[in-house]
Amino acid sequence: MKYTYKRGFYWLSVYIILALVPLIIAITGNIPEHRGFWMEFGVALGFIGFGVLCLQFVFSGRFRKIAPTYGMDNILQYHREMGIVAFIFILLHPAVIIVTDPGFISYFDPNVNAPRAVALVFVTLAIIVIIASSIWRLTFGLDYERWRLLHGFLSLAIIFIGVTHSIQVSHYLDPFWKKAGIGVLFLIYGYLILHTRITRPWLNKKKPYKIISVNPERGNCWTLTMKPEGHRRLDFFCGQFVWITIGPTPFSLQQHPFSIASSARDKTISLTTKEMGDFTSTWKDVKPGTRAFLEGPFGSFVPERGKNLFLIMGGIGITPAMGMLRTMRDNKDPRPAVLIYGNITWEDVTFREELEELTRQINLKQVHILEEPPEGWKGETGLVSKELLQKYLPDNPEEFMYFICGPEPLMDVSEIALKDLGIDWRLIYTERFEII
Ligand SMILES: Cc1cc2nc3c(=O)[nH]c(=O)nc-3n(C[C@H](O)[C@H](O)[C@H](O)COP(=O)(O)OP(=O)(O)OC[C@H]3O[C@@H](n4cnc5c(N)ncnc54)[C@H](O)[C@@H]3O)c2cc1C
């Protein structure tokens, strides 16, 4: 799945047009008398901020048309950055208007209109809570699930208040069709949330999986293998990921993303996790026969046909690479692959024995790099660095695709190093496991 400028411009244009829809509705047809640049500018900021905020639900909604094109981590990064842009616009909207005409401060006065004042103060506080809880989630002791719930609820409330506010003020939305337009827009975006949280899990209910084995792996990891029950296994490309819920129902707050570690040729699907927190630490106790639900596949961390593979993986970041290498083995794929695999100790190298076997089955060169090597270790030591990557970079680097997955520092160093070493950014793919 190639990154291209053309595709980038296409999606950017679609994004800008959709973000401007509320403003376009406001300024179409008869518009009221001009009240000076700054006043109209302040109003425009509100409509644009509202449009950008609504679009945030498209990015967090895991829509497969978008996710496979750009990758989950890039989309979430964009979601984060555009969230900040939306909030700046929304906060500037009253600020610019009030500075231009201080009389508008009355909008925040409960003696003038209590519901309106409460709603506007709520929006301001909600924005502060969303930003603070996203930056300092762990400091506040919020687990990921509760944070996600709070984040979604507050964002939806802000949008709802935004719609009500613009309809109530009505300055630019006077003919009824404009109010209806803004209302319909809200319903469409509201449905996107319902689709993600209700419709999709409901459809998924008909496609359960049965966990058939739970196996320990090196490095405090566990592999769940599951088979479809009464339906065809989902189709995926190696390197992609799914969202899994474990238990009798797909309606659960505990829905987590995992890369598919098994071969795309297998009839079953395997996911491997390292014990991290409340969800992943339950895997070792899962009983074979338990139900699971998979949503997906997602992700653009997928090798192109005809391109060789240069894999830079760290720790549990090996899972998508296992999917790729196992698929190459099953397809008898002769392409060269280089695996740079960083771990702390030799004992912790997940899939160590299988990788050894894979070097005999396919054209794989593996380079282990250990932070705490055992005595007598002759391989690479320390952390992945530009020098190390340069040492193993192939002579024909443009014929390779570069995949990076692992702890954040490894990913940052490797991405920058590859670019410094002259690798075209369009050949570099990253998959970040830590979302926030
Ligand atoms: C595309 C992708 C593929 C992944 N593949 C693997 C894999 O193959 N193996 C593996 O061990 N881990 C993988 N992860 C990470 C895995 O999803 C998290 O480690 C897991 O969700 C942690 O849940 P927890 O409750 O046990 O830990 P917690 O301590 O609650 O969370 C640890 C971190 O995991 C992330 N996280 C937690 N819950 C969620 C959620 N519901 N949705 C999204 N992120 C969440 C957050 O960044 C959080 O800070 C992947 C993540 C992504 C985004």
Image (cartoon, rainbow, N blue to C red):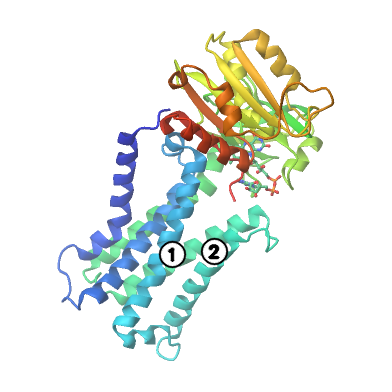
Percent of width and height locating residue 418: 50, 32
Quadrant of the image occupied by residue 247: top right
**As drawn, which residue projects farthest toward the bottom?**
111
State the residue position of label 2: 130
State the residue position of label 1: 87
* Relative depth, front residue between 319 and 202: 319
Q: Residue at x 44, y 76 (%)?
A: 120
In the displayed structure, 168 sits above or below 191; it is below
* Relative depth, front residue between 274 and 19: 274
Mark 2 in CB contact with mark 1 (< 8 angstroms): yes
Label 1 CA crowd tier, 10 Å (few <14, some 14–19, many 20+): many
In the displayed structure, 140 sits above or below 363; it is below
Q: Amino acid at mark 1?
A: Phe
Secondary element under disc 2, as helix, strand or loop, is helix
Quadrant of the image occupied by residue 229: top right
Label 2 CA crowd tier, 10 Å (few <14, some 14–19, many 20+): many
Q: Is mark 2 within 8 Å of ligand 1?
A: no
Say left or right for 407 vs 193: right
Number of residue marks: 2
Percent of width and height locating residue 172: 24, 71
Percent of width and height locating residue 349: 75, 27
In the displayed structure, 235 sits above or below 170; it is above
Res 171 seen here: no
Task: Compute the Cα span from label 2 to label 1.
Answer: 10 Å
